[in-house]
Amino acid sequence: MARNFSSKIMSVGYIPLPAWLILTTIAGFFAQDYNPIASHVSVMTLQDNFAHFLANMAALISGTAIILFGLGLWRYSNRFFSGGSFCWILFGGSMVANGVWPMGGPMHGLYIIGIFNVLAPALAMMDVKNQALRDRLYGITVFVSLSAVLYLWILLNGFDPDGYSGLTQRVFGIINLVWPLAFVFHLSRGIRES
């Protein structure tokens, strides 16, 4: 019963990627003097128009879904504390903060707490006892985790190509948000407990 309930909660893992992509893409059409290749999505939170509203909604919807996914993952793990779930919940909280506070202040992203997304996929896999599910997700987990570290390294060293920071944010954002989707997809395919 608990596994079934946690699977239903985790099904929101399908939501963050399309919600973020669709809403931020539409927002770009309403933004003034905005270049999605050159600028991060958060730049739209500085505008006073419909683009701001849509960018906020993308962050709020995606972030809330990630928090719920993390809670479902925690229930699924049957552990008192799940490091992976905790990291997903922190990352979701930082996304929600992006939808509440505009870019420029420390509350936008909750003091960069979203950095925990780097650990989220790998730590979450440590809490999954189902070996068949672990085997199916191994490759995507390695790819997503290494991509997150690569993006962090690029940002911290100033290697983000000038004029392409919006593109790199979207590429690595998509990669990161693929993990909950892949997890829920494989879980929903009825992989038996090993």
Image (cartoon, grey):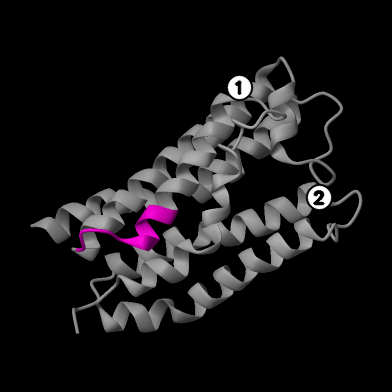
Camera-side residue: 182 or 149?
Answer: 149
- Type of residue at label 1? Phe
Q: Report whether 54 appears left or right of 85.
A: right
- Tell me: residue 34, above or below residue 176: above
Question: Is 31 one of the magenta-colored residues?
Answer: no
Task: Please identify the residue farthest to the right as the structure is shown.
Answer: 162
Q: Does 80 sit above or below residue 39?
A: below
Which mark is nearer the camera, 1 or 2?
Answer: 2
Q: Residues within 10 Å of mark 1 (few under 14, many from 20)?
A: some
The residue under the point 66% across, 59% down is 172
Q: Mark 2 points at which residue?
A: 165
Residue at point 45% right, 47% down?
A: 90
The verdict on residue 86 being magenta is yes
- Quarter residue 126 falls in: bottom left
Which residue is at the front of the view, 122 or 30? 122
The amino acid type found where label 2 is placed reads Ser
The N terminus, quarter of image: bottom left
In the displayed structure, would residue 93 be above or below residue 49? below
Residue 125 left/right relative to 176: left
Please tell me which residue lies in front, 16 or 152. 152
Q: Closest to the observer: 68 or 85?
A: 85
Gap between marks 1 and 2 measured at Cα: 22 Å
Residue located at (18% from left, 79% from top): 193
**Helix, strand or loop at mark 1:** helix
Q: In this view, does 67 lie above or below 26?
A: below
| Kind of element beneath mark 2 | helix
Residue 187: image location, x then y, percent: 30, 67
- Pointer 1 residue: 53
Numbered range of the magenta stretch? 79-87
Residue 71's tag is: none
Residue for point 77% across, 56% down: 155
Return the disc, 1 or 2, that comes first in the chain's sequence: 1
